[in-house]
Amino acid sequence: MAKIHLNNIAHSYQPNPNGPDDYALKSMEHIWEDGKTYALLGPSGCGKTTLLNIISGLLTPSEGHVLFGDDDVTSLPTEERNIAQVFQFPVIYDTMSVRQNLAFPLKNRGESVEAINARVEEIASMLGLTDQLDSRALNLSSDAKQIISLGRGLVRDDVNAILFDEPLTMIDPHKKWLLRSKLKKLHQEFGFTMVYVTHDQTEAMTFADHVVVMKDGEILQVGTPKELFERPRHTFVGHFIGSPGMNFLPVSLEGNKAKFNGQTIKLNHDYSTDISDNIMLGIRPEYIAVTTPDNGGIIASVTNVEDLGKHKIVRMTIGDHTLSAIVPEETEISTNEVSISFTPENTLIYRNNLLIEKDK
Ligand code: ADP
Ligand code: MG
């Protein structure tokens, strides 16, 4: 196994791209460390499948190089890259039994019958397919077919990496959770590098050590779930991660104070910015305290309170701006107007959508 290095990769599906908009992947430099689990997270169409297919060799990038360790594999076909890939829809042979389907990738590599049988039974038991091993794949539900497809991706223990392209989208939520836990367990046992593509933040955050957030063909941030939550480096990451996502308010800055709608918000750091910059204050709903309006602080109008049982989400407006706060379940919101305050160490400042980095 080896690290996978995407060296100045870019890809356009057009033969003569004219400018950045013609690229499904804009120029990027990224290393997938050996033995780590990654989630590749981003909205539909942002280039996740394109990126995965470049790693597996189904696609040759229009620019840059793919390196496995020190070896340049850019022009090597999939078969020679020693990568397993699981797709969103089942890729199985209907005429074969479940056992034959699972054995197929091993048979192709000329492994002994005993080794194949042992491994097939191990994977089948892990995925709950033991009872169906001798059934014909044709007669199974689409759920079961997708799980067999997953099994085919997991059956080899000598791969450089396993790539999953939204493999559980069609599976019901409870089973999805079980399968994801099994994938994690398998990772602990064998230590394969895993890249798991999803557009679902919960799936990404619960599966991976590192989450790679993409938008419009670019990687915006790579971080642990905690880093993405606490310090989103781009406003999109703040919006996209969290439920509800981060609040953003347009502000002007005066040293360690932000001015918003005629009110002052205290900051932990001094900032100096240009008048032409687009400055936003970012605050997670978890870090907004909501009290009665006679408590000082910023006055907001409540538009809705959602009681989720474990906490409440308070939706508010200040002038034309909307924002949300997550408050403890026992908080009573009985007035139309409330006073809100922000924890200064969790109040971040963004210039032209990028976080202005300050030490905590
Ligand atoms: P994701 O997997 O994140 O949904 P894709 O990698 O499939 O995104 O697509 C990225 C962009 O490339 C999209 O704009 C999509 O329409 C375009 N695209 C994907 N595959 C092809 C193709 N074979 N030919 C032309 N354009 C494509
Ligand atoms: Mg895709």
Image (cartoon, rainbow, N blue to C red):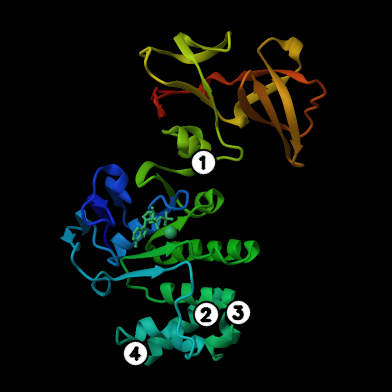
Secondary element under disc 2, as helix, strand or loop, is helix
Secondary element under disc 3, as helix, strand or loop, is loop
Residues at marks 4 and 2 touching, judged by CB atoms closer than 8 Å:
no
- Mark 3 or 2: in front is 3
Which comes before the other along the chain, label 3 or label 1? Answer: 3
Q: Which residue is mark 1?
A: 240
Residue 265 on image: x %, y %: 56, 13
Q: State the residue at coordinates (39%, 55%).
A: 48
Q: Nearer the viewer, residue 106 or 93?
A: 93
Q: Image quarter for residue 336? A: top right
The three-letter amino acid code for the residue at tag 3 is: Ser
Q: Quote the CA–CA distance across marks 3 and 2.
A: 16 Å
Q: Left of 1 or right of it: where is 208?
A: right
* Badge 1: residue crowd in 10 Å (few <14, some 14–19, many ≥20): many
Q: Which residue is mark 3?
A: 141
181 in relation to 128, above or below: above
Which comes before the other along the chain, label 3 or label 4? Answer: 4
Residue 54 on image: x %, y %: 29, 60
Q: Which residue is mark 4?
A: 112
- Mark 3 or 4: in front is 3
Residues at marks 3 and 1 touching, judged by CB atoms closer than 8 Å:
no
Secondary element under disc 4, as helix, strand or loop, is loop
Which comes before the other along the chain, label 4 or label 1? Answer: 4
Which comes before the other along the chain, label 4 or label 2? Answer: 4
Label 2 CB, ligand 2: below 8 Å? no
